[in-house]
């Protein structure tokens, strides 16, 4: 099977939604104060600095270790993380919707407290099934995301055999790519 020379994944920098979610969880609120749809959430000031740090890391790699190609989630926070890192490098970048964040369906915009209060049956079902297999109504399970990443990896191996590939995505994708590439079990992944 075709293999890549290297594969990196960079999680986007801190977003304004990450900040809002932390504040909502800490205050015990049911809803996260979101002003954008998920695909349009921008980076926070900290996230902007993190994107510049990623650019410095990439620039510090020896030429023979730098990526040959980049693939980016179409979500704004991932795009904005990739732009400084790739600026002036000549690394071709494309966007791929298979790198989008996990869709949360009816639970989108809710804190853990909000899910428990508004959808107690769903909270109980998630507890019973576990994080890996639980699919919220209208959303995706981690295994659903793993299926789209499996397809992406197959395409990357076919189209970029022997090349170094840099991905820009989201936190669940980092975990699930490790699950796929390293052959982890559910228990190892959740640990």
Image (spheres, rainbow, N blue to C red):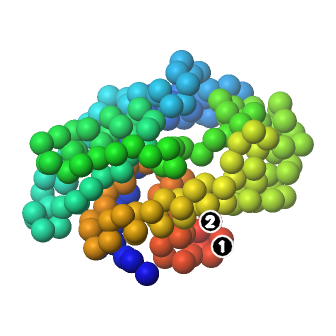
Q: Secondary structure at mark 1?
A: helix
Count of residue discs? 2
Q: How packed is label 2: few (under 14 Cα within 10 Å), some, or many (20 or more)?
A: few
Residue extending furthest toward the bottom: 1
Q: Is residue 141 visible?
A: yes
Q: Give x and y (percent) for residue 164.
A: 27, 65
Residue at the spot 31% in from the left edge and 61% down from the top edge: 165
Residue at the spot 54% in from the left edge and 69% down from the top edge: 179
Q: Which mark is residue 190?
A: 2
How far apart are the two marked residues, 2 and 1, measured between alpha carbons? 5 Å
From the viewer's side, name the closer residue of 109 and 25.
109
> Looking at the image, do the residues carrying marks 2 and 1 touch, with CB atoms under 8 Å apart?
yes
Residue extending furthest toward the front: 159
Q: Which mark is residue 187?
A: 1
Quarter location, residue 183: bottom right
Q: Give x and y (percent) for residue 112.
A: 71, 39
From the viewer's side, name the closer residue of 188 and 141.
141
Q: How packed is label 1: few (under 14 Cα within 10 Å), some, or many (20 or more)?
A: few
Residue extending furthest toward the top: 35
Quarter location, residue 151: bottom right
Residue at the spot 45% in from the left edge and 36% down from the top edge: 75
Residue at the spot 14% in from the left edge and 61% down from the top edge: 61
Q: Secondary structure at mark 2?
A: helix
Q: Measured along the vertical axis of the image, is residue 65 above or below residue 76?
A: below
| Lateral position of residue 164 relative to residue 117, left or right | left
Quarter of the image for the N terminus: give it.
bottom left
Q: Measured along the vertical axis of the image, is residue 138 above or below residue 125?
A: above
From the viewer's side, name the closer residue of 111 and 70.
70
């Amino acid at each position: 099977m075709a293999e890549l020379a290297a594969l990196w994944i960079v999680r986007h920098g801190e977003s304004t939604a990450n900040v809002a979610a932390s504040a909502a969880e800490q205050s015990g609120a049911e809803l996260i104060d979101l002003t954008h749809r998920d695909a349009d959430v921008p980076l926070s000031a900290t996230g902007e600095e993190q994107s510049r740090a990623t650019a410095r890391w990439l620039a510090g790699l020896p030429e023979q270790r730098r990526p040959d190609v980049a693939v980016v989630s179409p979500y704004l926070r991932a795009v904005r993380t990739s732009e400084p890192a790739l600026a002036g490098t000549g690394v071709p970048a494309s966007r791929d919707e298979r790198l989008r964040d996990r869709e949360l369906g009816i639970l989108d915009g809710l804190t853990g407290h909000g899910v428990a209060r508004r959808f107690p049956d769903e909270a109980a079902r998630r507890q019973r099934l576990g994080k890996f297999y639980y699919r919220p109504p209208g959303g995706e399970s981690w295994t659903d995301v793993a299926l789209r990443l499996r397809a992406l990896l197959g395409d990357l191996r076919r189209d970029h055999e022997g090349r170094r590939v840099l991905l820009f995505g989201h936190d669940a994708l980092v975990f699930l790519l490790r699950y796929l590439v390293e052959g982890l079990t559910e228990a190892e992944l959740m640990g």
